[in-house]
Image (cartoon, rainbow, N blue to C red):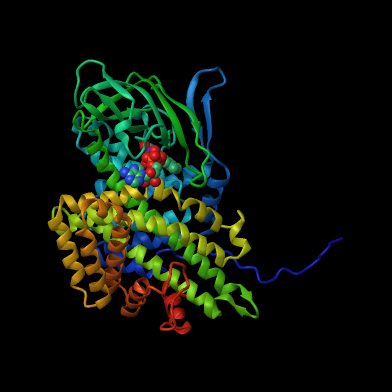
Amino acid sequence: MQWQTHEITNQVPELQNYNLFETDVCLRDGVNQYAAAWHKEALHQFGDRLGTPDVIALGELANKHLPELNTHDRHGKRIDHVTFHASWHQLLSMLREQDLHAMPWSRPRTGAQVARAAGYYMQAQIEAGSLCPTTMTFAAIPVLQKEPALFAQLQSQLFSSEHDPRDLPIAQKKSIMIGMGMTEKQGGSDVRTNTTIARAINKEGRGQPYLLTGHKWFFSAPMCDAHLVLAKTQAGLSCFFVPRWKPDGSKNPVQVQRLKSKLGNQSNSSSEVEFLDAYGVMVGEEGRGIPTIIEMANLTRLDCVIGSAALMRQALVQAIHHARHRQAFGRLLSDQTLMRNVLADLALESEAATSLMLKLASVAEAGDDPLSQTWKRVMTPAARFWICKRAIEFTGECMEVWGGNGYVETGPMARLYREAPVNSIWEGSGNVMCLDVLRAIERDPKGAQLLLQEFRTSDAPAIQAMVDNLEQNLQLPAEAREFNARRIAQQLVLVAQSYLLEKNAAPEIAAAFTHSRLDPDCGRIYGSFGHTMDSAFCQHILQRALPE
Ligand SMILES: Cc1cc2nc3c(=O)[nH]c(=O)nc-3n(C[C@H](O)[C@H](O)[C@H](O)COP(=O)(O)OP(=O)(O)OC[C@H]3O[C@@H](n4cnc5c(N)ncnc54)[C@H](O)[C@@H]3O)c2cc1C
């Protein structure tokens, strides 16, 4: 006998079988504009695949069945092995097949950074934890390329498009992943406090083998085949390539103490490790470990921007989709005037984030042109600060569009929300990014002038007014400038986003963004557009954001 207490109605169908590329006008336009149109067909196919129920399920599975650490095998031998659900490896295989770990280096051509950013941005919408080892590998390659002897041994495995999960010495593997180890218990932002030491086995210096003793308090993706690790020699902090296996085929004594129990980013394992005379090869100049590894960090910052823009985009499309199917008080949520205000405001924020991340990807390969260099050096940390922070409240607001269903773990919104803060903390938290923006400006004031001049080519009085304000803040005495560093980074990003939307998006979209972001009455909460924008215009913004 069947009991039926009620009929199920007004629940929203899954958002699936949609093409993540074709439905994203800002992404498509950016790929054309920044010389990556050659990759459009591949992105179209990838976008289609990512939207299938099977791939969406991989993201859910990898975050439900979490990584497990086994420090010893059943015979008591130390193995420091992390096991993952099959979905994790399938996600890494997809990232790898698309060359998202290496494309600009393995297949260099104009537009490769943007093509890669577009693919990364799409997969990031489906699952974010697997991005961590992919990003670290991507960022390590240019550092390793500067060590020709070492790179020659690694190149084919680094560039390979095939994920190889086996825990074997590098020479026996089809492909490898690289991580980074900087943060210790006593300090992460200030790595000068690192206490891990390295002693030369024979000769000292670049390319020579050392033994490392000490620890790292955060060491993500310990199953990577090697990590770039900071440790002290007599000359100061230096950078070392520390593989999981030693050249003699024995396990390198990098002991995983435990896995971090994290708020989000749960599919990815982050660990605490100790080095017990661990083998490592010096990379870069002795005593120049920070500049060596900072080169890597510049690229991880770009990926944090892409990853956060992706979280925003996915939260947005989920919110719009929900509002188009859920009714309250006799009407669809998407037809309710106030809800349209909220969703349209979110859509503008998401488009501005995507637009800026595409620009930053384009300047990542822009050579020595001083203006592009300034975009890279000043705007990457500024965007990393602002967009990663915006993603936190953004995903929370989108979750609320789903009502109670947003807050429970059976849907995607809770995962997006829990994922959002990590990009703002990891490798350079908010304040550190803002101080970096100031440092970049102080180091190259002419470049900063060029950037402001570029913004001034806009006719919009609002943009001109923002640049005036910025110039005043930049002229403050050093202490006051530091005090205002967050304000300066925020102003830089809002100006840049307004400017980019004016150049690249429909004029009415650019005007709506610029006016609302500069309107002091608009406030800090999404959905505060004033009466100069109406419900019909908001509907137009939503159609652009996710065509019905
Ligand atoms: C999920 C996850 C994974 C991670 N994976 C790795 C990894 O793989 N490898 C690795 O090396 N690290 C990793 N980290 C560590 C991360 O990079 C550090 O947590 C981060 O750099 C901050 O360092 P900290 O935790 O020591 O905080 P602190 O350095 O103590 O900073 C605390 C706060 O003070 C602020 N602050 C610092 N200096 C100043 C200043 N001069 N003025 C104003 N404010 C300041 C910071 O912005 C921050 O908000 C990971 C962290 C997380 C959460």
Residue drawn at x 25%, y 50% is 479
Above or below residue 194? Residue 129 is: below
Looking at the image, the residue that sits furthest to the right is 1
Residue 526 pos. (x, y %): 46, 69
Q: Position of residue 128 (x, y in %)?
A: 45, 50
Q: Nearer the viewer, residue 298 or 115?
A: 298
| Residue 236 vertical placement versus 338 (above, below) | above
Outermost residue, top side: 202
In this rendered view, identify the residue nearer to me: 33 or 263.
263
**Residue beneath the point at 34% across and 33% down:** 227
Residue at point 51%, 44% (across, down) = 266
* Image-based side of 245 in relation to 380, left or right: right
**Which quarter of the figure is the N terminus placed in?**
bottom right
Residue 423 screen position, x and y as percent:
40, 50
Please determine whether, in this image, residue 162 is positioned above or below residue 372.
Answer: above
| One can see residue 51 in this view | no
Ligand 1: give its quadrant.
Answer: top left
Front residue of 161 and 7? 7
Residue 458 picture quarter: bottom left
Label tally: 0
Camera sees residue 233: yes
Q: Is 498 on the left-hand or right-hand side of 391?
A: left
Residue 196 image position (x, y, % from top left):
34, 25
Residue 117's quadrant in the figure?
Answer: bottom left
